[in-house]
Amino acid sequence: MKAAVNGITERISLIGVSSTMKVAADAENLRARGVDVVDLGAGEPDFPTPANIKQAAILALERNFTKYTAAAGTLELKTAICHAHARDFGTAYTPEECIVTVGGKHAVFQLTQALIGPGDEVVIPAPYWVTYKDVVNYAGGKCVFVDTNEADGFALTAAMIDPYLHGRAKMVIVNSPSNPSGAVVDRAEFEKIVRLTAERGIYLMTDECYCHFLYDSAPFSAASLPGAKETVLVAGSLSKTYAMTGWRIGFGLAPKPIVTAMTKLQSHSTSNPTSIAQKAAVEALSGPQDSVALMLQEYRRRRDFVVQRLRAIPGVTCAEPRGAFYVYPNVGVALGKNGIQNTLQFAGRLLEDAHVAAVPGEAFGTDRHIRISYAASMPELERGLVRLHRFIVSHS
C-alpha cells in the first residue's frame, strides 16, 4: 500500500470524518463563542443513565474492579448479553459466540474487518448510517448501495436487494430501526431477506442499535429465525437502549470462528472494554428494564410532535419514523436558491444563520434530506423547529 507524500497511508484516505461528529464539533465551536445553538444533530439520548446502572459502576470501583479483563470481555457480561438476547428475542447464543466491544460502532467495524477483503461487495440500503460506507472502504471492499423509497417510508424489501446478491457480494447490512430514517423491516420481510442471503452464502449483518425503540411493532431480531445463526451477524449496543453512550459498550453475536477473528483484532487494538463499564452493563442487561419503556413512551410523544411541525413547513415532506429517534425530512424546497445547492450547504447555513444543528443527507447517501434527532427535550425541539421553519420559508 503506497503512502502519501505526507506519510499518511492510502487506506486512511479511503475514509472520511464522521459527519455526525463534525456537526457536533461545529455546534460546540459556536457555543464556545457564546452562540445559543439548538442541537438536533446528536444521536444521543438526553436521558441520564439509570441510577441502578451507575450504582453498579460505583460498586465496581469500590471493589477495585479496575484491572484488565479478557480481551473479548468478561464471562459475566458475555453471559448476560446472551441471556438478555434470548429473553428479548428468543435466540440461543453462548458466550463463545459473543464478544464485548467498545461501543456498537466497534462491533460493526470488527465484523467488517474480519470478513470483508479487497473487492468483496457489501450491499447497503440507502439512506444508510454514515459509518458503514467508511468501514467497508477501509477493509478494501466495495459498497453497493440500494435506494429505498421515501414514499414508502424508506422501507427495505428483499426484492430490492435481490438483484445485487451475485458475483462478489459477501455481506448485506440492515439497520432496523434505521438511523437516519426510522424505517423498520417487518418480520415477514426479514424472513425473506434471511432466506435469500443464506441460500446464496452471503452474510447478513443486522445492526440492532435501536432494536428496543419501535412504535407499532414488537422488537425482533433476524438472528432468532430458524437456522439464522450460521449467516446472521448481530451488532448490538447498550448506548441508546440504556442511555449509556459514553460508557462505550457494544457487542457482537456471530459464529465462534468469526468471534475468534474479531477477538484477535481487538486484542491488538483496544484490548478489553473498560472493566467498570462492563460491570455497569451487566446490571443494565440483568436489572430492571422499566427505563426502556419510559424512554420509548417519551420518544413517541416527541416523534408525533416533530413530524406534525415539520409537515406544517411549506414544501417540506416527512415520512413518519416507525422506530429509533430520528426524522428524515425532505428539504428540497430550499435547495437551488440563495446559494444553497445541496444539503451540506443547507446544514451549514442552518447552523450559522439559524443556530440549529442538523446532519446533511449527503452523509447518509441522499441529496434532499436532513437528519433531525428528537432525542432532545420538548422545549429544545420547539425552539429548533421554529427556527428551522423560519429558515426554510426565508430560503424557499
Image (cartoon, grey):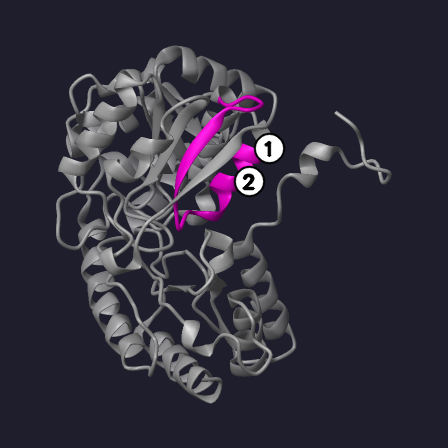
Between residues 336 and 215, which one lies in front from this camera angle? Answer: 336
Q: Which residue is mark 1?
A: 138
SS for callout 1: helix
Give the side of residue 182 with respect to residue 214, left or right: right
Count residues near mark 1 (Cα–Cα under 10 Å), then give few for <14, some for 14-19, many for 20+: many
Q: Is residue 317 above or below residue 224?
A: below
Q: Quadrant of the N terminus?
A: top right
Q: Residue at x 18, y 52 (%)?
A: 293
* Amino acid on which the number 1 mark rests in the picture: Tyr
Residue 95 is covered by the magenta coloring: no
Mark 1 in CB contact with mark 2 (< 8 angstroms):
yes
Q: Residue at x 29, y 40 (%)?
A: 160
Task: Residue 383 in the image: state x and y as whole percent.
Answer: 39, 81
Q: Residue furthest top?
A: 257
- Left or right placement of residue 350 versus residue 125 in this view: right
Quick check: is 119 in the magenta stretch? yes
User: Which residue sits at x=61%, y=21%?
Assistant: 268
Magenta region: 116-137
- Residue identifier under label 2: 134
Where residue 234 appears, as percent x and y from the top left, is 33, 29
Neighbourhood count class around disc 2 (C-alpha, 10 Å): few under 14, some 14–19, many 20 upward:
some
Residue 220 position in % (x across, y down): 18, 37
Find residue 230 and report its image quarter: top left
